Image (cartoon, grey):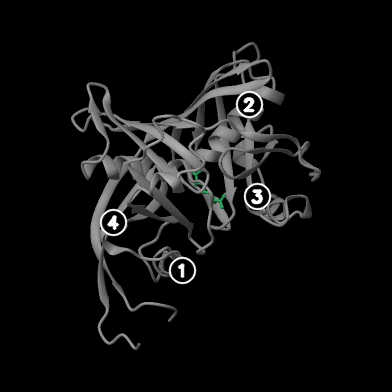
Amino acid sequence: MIQRQPLIVPFTKMNGAGNDFVVLDNRFLRFSEAELEALARRVCPRWTGVGADGLLALDPPEAASGDGAAEGDASGGTDFRMRYRNADGSLATMCGNGARCLARFAARAGLGRDTPEGTRLAFMTDGGRYTARVTPEADAPASVMLDVPSPRGFGASGATSDLGDVHQIWTGTEHAVVFVEDVDAAPVATEGERLRHDPAFAPAGTNVNFVQRAAASGARGERIRVRTFEKGVEAETLACGTGAMAAALVARLAGGVDADSIAVEMPGGTLGVGFQVVDGEVRGLTLSGPAEFVYEGTLEWWGGEE
Ligand SMILES: N[C@H](CCC[C@H](N)C(=O)O)C(=O)O
C-alpha cells in the first residue's frame, strides 16, 4: 500500500559515555525487525538523520517460552525485550552502552522494581538475559550497572597485525583486542578497519579495540585507555561497552593487568568493568557508567526504503 502521510514517530536521544542512540518505545509503535533495520539506516546518519551509533527499541517482554536463554534462572522473568540495530541497520547481538541506556529509559517508563539502591530490571537481548540496576533519579549523575553473562571464546584470533598479538573474546558480541604503547597514536581508522574485515573473523566480522595499559610501572594497572573501531558503524565510536569489557578482560587474562576492577577510559568517558577470575573462569562480570537523556523529538517516517 502506498503511504500518503508520514508516520510521526516519537523518539528519545540518549548516550552512554558518548556512545549515542535513538531510542524508540516499541511497546506502542510495534515496528518489525525489518522496519527497525530500515529505521536505523534512516535516522542514524549524522547529516540526514538524527545522528546516532545505533537504534534501540524497547519491546514488551516475551512469553516465558521465548526466554529460552534465561540460563536456568528460576526467576527468569523479564521486564522488557531489547532490540538493537547498528547505524548501518545490521543486527548486533548486544550493545553494552545501549543496554545501559535502555535500562534507564525503561526505569523512567516505570518498569522494573524500585529498591533503595535504585531500580532493578531484567531483560532479554539477542545475546541472552541481562539484569541492570539504575541509580535513583534523584542521585545525579545517573549511573547504570549491567550484570553480564560470562564471556566466551577468549584466545588468539588467528589474525595478525604489525602492532602485535590480536586477541579475541566474545562479550555479547565479537571483539578483537590489540595492545599499543600510545592509544592516542593508534591507527584506529586504518588498522581497525583492516582487522574488522580480516578473514579470521568472517563471517560475522569483529569490533576492534586498541588498548593502552597503565603507563606507570609498578602501578596495579586498574586503569586502561581504549579506543574502539565498531563494525556496523564502520568507524571509531566515542565509547563501546562490550569493547570496554573485552579490553579489561584481555588486559587481565593476557595483558599483565592484575586487577578485578578496571576503569576503562574511552574518548567519550570512563566505564567501570568488574569481575572475578576463578580457576581461569570469568564470573560476576559487570559494566557500569553514565547513561544520559539528551532530548526527545519526533521523526517523520514514510515506511520502507526511500
Ligand atoms: N557500542 C556497543 C557495541 C555495539 C556492537 C556492534 N558494533 C556490533 O558488534 O556489531 C557497546 O556499547 O557495546
Residue type of the residue flagged with mark 3: Thr
Task: Please give left or right for residue 126 compared with residue 136 in the image.
Answer: right
Cα–Cα gap, marks 3 and 1: 23 Å
- Percent x, y of residue 181: 68, 32
Is residue 3 among the parts visible in the rendering?
yes
Residue type of the residue flagged with mark 2: Arg
Cα–Cα gap, marks 2 and 4: 43 Å
Q: Are marks 4 and 3 in contact (CB under 8 Å)?
A: no
Comes first in the chain, label 4 or label 3: 4
Q: Residue shown at 28%/56% (left/top)?
A: 27
Q: Residues within 10 Å of mark 3 (few under 14, many from 20)?
A: many
| Marks 2, 1: nearer the viewer | 1
> According to the image, label 1 marks what residue?
34
> According to the image, label 3 marks what residue?
206
User: Which image quarter holds the N terminus?
Assistant: bottom left
> According to the image, label 2 marks what residue?
213
Residue type of the residue flagged with mark 4: Arg
> According to the image, label 4 marks what residue?
27
